[in-house]
Image (cartoon, rainbow, N blue to C red):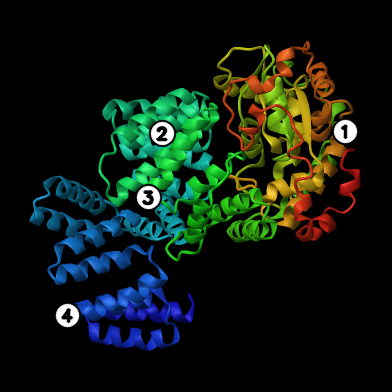
Amino acid sequence: MSVLEAKVLQVRDMQAQGDHEAALDAARRLLATYPANRDLLLIAAIALRHLQRTAEALEMLGRLDALRPDFSQLWQERGLCHVAMRDSQNAIAALQTAVTLNPALPMAWRMLDGLFRMTGDTTSAARAAGQSAHLASLPPPVLRAKMLFGDGEIEAAEMMVREFLLTHGDHPEAMRLLAQIGCVHEVYDDAEMLLAGVLTLVPDHHEARNEYVQTLIARHNYAFARNALVPLLALDPLNEHYRSHAAAIAIGLGEHEQAISIFRSILENIHDTMPQAQMRRAEFNLWLGHALKAVGDLPGTLTAYHASIGARPDFGEAWWSLANLKIYRFTEDQIAAMTRAEISTTTSATDRIHLSFALGKALEDRSDYAASWAAYLRGNGARRADSKYRPEILETNTREQKRVCAPVFFAERNRWGDPTPDPIFVLGLPRSGSTLVEQILASHSQVEGTQELPDIQRIVHELQGRELDFVNPRYPGVLPDLDAAAVRSMAERYILETRPYRVLGRARFIDKMPNNFRHIGLIHLILPNARIIDARRNPMDCCFSNLKQLFAQGQEFTYSIEDIARYYRTYLDLMRHWDKVLPGRVLRVINEDLIDDPEGQIRRMLDHCALPFEDACLNFHQNTRSVRTPSSEQVRRPISRDGVDQWKPYAPWLGELTEALGDAIETWRV
């Protein structure tokens, strides 16, 4: 505990004993040195309210609001001040904000119960009373941990709830909270296990089941998520949250038309124009636009994205979604609107990042390359600042792959896995032409295009284990410890769990997860007859294209010149290793060669996959299958050279990239 923390604790003790004058005096003395301390500002405001100096308390809360507008107890205290002033309308608004930010505030719920009853809103009063009773039923340590979690104090909440579970054993709400913490850390397998345990203890725990469905969706276990969602939809078939889960599951399973129908139905039932309704309208129109984009309905996509922006003009993701169509061109008025939103102090950090990338694309299309690059730099800088990406982790893993996956390793395990030839893996870097390769192959009558499947990554995560050691990683070092039965089991599980994505029933299917190039050794081990294609693009175009792309999730290496250049070089290093130890196993398809000689390169790909040539592969742009990657609109047009040398207008600002790539600029083809 720091000296300041100890002093804050002393002031809290004064307040807890009812000595508000002393607490206020002590807090003000400390604030002279620490004017931005959240806890001291709150203590001072509480003391002022108790001393019936409510106007001063609200002024103190205004200072806190300027620093931490997302602090739930600020809003709870503001609500209590309005109660003291007999202002029920503002009290309700403030307290509702408090419990929206942090549902684990017993006092806020109790006050809302009384206020709603006083104003005649019995439905809201009953809900508040229910929440208050639920929180009152929790063991104090669990309640305290939930309050900490609600205000973003994740580590403290985790320590408290883990200690409680170790001492008291299974408790549904403690397990549920630990699962929520796991989701924040993206440890979804732990969260899934904990929530499954909660439902075993309390099968009709609807909130836990809702979170369980969300976790399964996050893990891309869509078939399991659909089964888990059934009881919730049976309970409340019109529930907006449950129906949005159903739509997400449908999208995950490639059932875009079903998702479109759900989103449109939800939007039809949003009637009011209050701010919260407008937020929902913006979100659901955005998701509708994404689904329509996947099936190639460009007019519908544009209508949905425009409706999303109309509902919330500073919605950065909607603006970026227009830009990410690649073929959309913004008007002067739209560029001005985005510029205003980007610089507005009320725009959230996430919206601002999306707006920066959207402006970069809008200005690029107008050949204002200096301003465009500046916008891309703003977006990349902000995104990189929030990222925990460490390039040395991949580089360590690459060294380990080269050490473990030697020729003797594969020779000793020849044909251990499942002999099925069904999967065709298309991999490489993002923005390298992999979606084009997938679209060409998926136009063949024997091949089904799916999406970027997470199943190889899921196997890797399980081999890696929960204790991550970035210096001596468990994976791939654990691969030599696997026996033939374990390898075969992994292969059979992969085939089984990818089956829900194969809706057309074709003999072969594509797994287009670019980052699977890191795991070619594992793929060869478990699926020795699977075909593998490396989609490769020249480093300047590939790296630049990544720098101007804002990904929905992952790909954290794309947000700085140094990171993307190091990643590209590491990719070349590892692919050369696979070529050496598994000669002929991977077919390299150069994007520029595919553009210059489509038929020749398509025949190479089909020969590699043991497939007969079909003219439909040349006419891939006529394929109406759904596509969910940023290249969706591009692969619905004939091949062109539009993407070649796109970096050159930005050459004055890409000297650092050229230097960072080094000899890769000359040697990238081999």
> Can residue 469 be seen from the camera position used here?
no
Separation of disc 4 and disc 3 at Cα? Answer: 42 Å
Image location (x, y in percent) of residue 349: 50, 59
Which residue is at the front of the view, 346 or 139? 346
User: Which badge, 1 or 3, comes first in the chain's sequence?
Assistant: 3
User: Which badge, 2 or 3, comes first in the chain's sequence?
Assistant: 3
User: How many other residues sit within 10 Å of disc 4, few (<14), some (14-19) or many (≥20)?
Assistant: some
Which residue is at the front of the view, 663 or 269? 269
User: Which badge, 1 or 2, comes first in the chain's sequence?
Assistant: 2
- Return the residue at label 1: 579
> Can residue 650 be seen from the camera position used here?
yes
Q: Residue at x 42, y 34 (%)?
A: 213
Q: Helix, strand, or loop for circle 4?
A: loop
Mark nearer the viewer, 2 or 3: 2
Amino acid bearing label 4: Gln
Q: Helix, strand, or loop for circle 1?
A: helix
- Return the residue at label 4: 52
Amino acid bearing label 3: His
Image location (x, y in percent) of residue 170: 38, 44
Q: Residue at x 53, y 26 (%)?
A: 295
User: How many other residues sit within 10 Å of disc 2, few (<14), some (14-19) or many (≥20)?
Assistant: many
Image location (x, y in percent) of residue 307: 41, 41
- Return the residue at label 3: 168
Q: Residue at x 22, y 79 (%)?
A: 55
Mark nearer the viewer, 4 or 3: 4
- Return the residue at label 2: 245
User: Which badge, 4 or 2, comes first in the chain's sequence?
Assistant: 4
